[in-house]
Image (tube, rainbow, N blue to C red):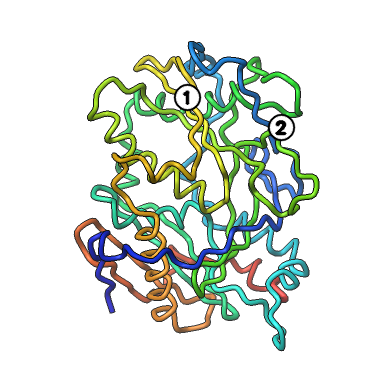
Amino acid sequence: MNFHVKRADRYDGRFPSFRKPSEIGFFSLDSERKFHNDNHQMKYICLPRSLRNVYMDLNAGYEDAIRKDFGKKEKIDILLTWILFHQDEVKHMFHVPNSNKPQIDFVCFRGLLTTIGTTIYENKEDWLICATKFRSVIYLCAFDTEDHIHRRETATPRDKLMSAWGYKFEQYLVTDAPNSKPNLSIPVNEKEEYCIVLKGRLNNHTLLYSAEVDGKDPFYSNSDRDPSSTQCYLELKTSRMMTTDRQHFNFCRYKLLKWWLQSFLVGIPKVICGFRDDDGIVRNLEVFPVSEMPKAPESQWSPSSILNFTSHFMDYVKSSVIKDDPNVVYKFYWKPGNPIICEELNSSEYQVLPEWYISNLKI
């Protein structure tokens, strides 16, 4: 049965029940994308004294930067590795009375949830998501579509340069320790990441998901607060300087939408944006409180519509993913203007769970 995507306003109305996400773990990825069960890649945000009239050249060191291979299929293996390391904690954190199984409906990455949530406002990019049910838990994994692969393979040198600007911007603003200065002398390494693991709930859907975070606010004090709070993290973004009303409209309509959802899903309170010119020079910084993003009159998107649609899609996935078998894959494909199509596969190409996870999971 296909799932028809209605107009965004059809999902508006009452804001759904959404439990504030809590941090239940973390991990690091090194310069070779290898998993480390620690926080050695965690960074701290270091802002300049003045946010105006800065000069940050995002092209600097471009030739020496270590690129992330976006064509390599990592699937959700990194998150699965974390789960295997922390099976007892997961069982405890998702425990429900009178049951020996943890109550987890979905396991995925934050980026996949963002893709789902923005579907009702998306008019260009398609998506492909695969699902597998194993021991009552549905694992969701995003795959590249043919359009995504084509865009990557036909990217121009200018496209590749611009895609590297965000990583360079982060280097200007992060440090390894509080009260230290950013180190601009080393090459940018796009492969390194610090990720947190979260427990969340949207209506009746319990989620275990992971998200990369850019850095901690060194001035945030966690004393007498919830140790699982994610309010200490900040998000870093870049965007082109705006000189026309149309540019401002597009910024609020498209960029703020994704920034809001990405941050809201993790509980991040602020986004720091570096506004750059066409030559890749950041001239000004601006802090955007996440709670204020939907209030911009140009935004024209509804947080309740986004999350209500996400919840409806999860209902659809639950009703479609019937077989509890790690070798059975359900493929969900959507193209703007069309319904979401579900197809059951017995295909290794879209296999979500590797054998090493299936054989070592004890919960």
Is residue 116 among what the camera can see?
no
In this view of the protein, which residue sits in the foreground, 64 or 240? 240
Q: Which mark is residue 203?
A: none
Q: Residue furthest right?
A: 223
Q: Are marks 1 and 2 in contact (CB under 8 Å)?
A: no
- Give, as a three-letter code, the residue at label 1: Gly
Rendered location of residue 17, percent (x, y)? 49, 67
In this view of the protein, which residue sits in the foreground, 116 or 335? 116
Q: Secondary structure at mark 2?
A: loop
The residue labelled by disc 2 is 218
- Give, as a three-letter code, the residue at label 2: Pro
Quarter of the picture containing the N terminus is bottom left
Q: Secondary structure at mark 1?
A: strand
The image quadrant that residue 210 belongs to is bottom right
The residue labelled by disc 1 is 274
Rendered location of residue 143, percent (x, y)? 42, 56
Q: Residue furthest bottom?
A: 98
In this view of the protein, which residue sits in the foreground, 46 or 73? 46
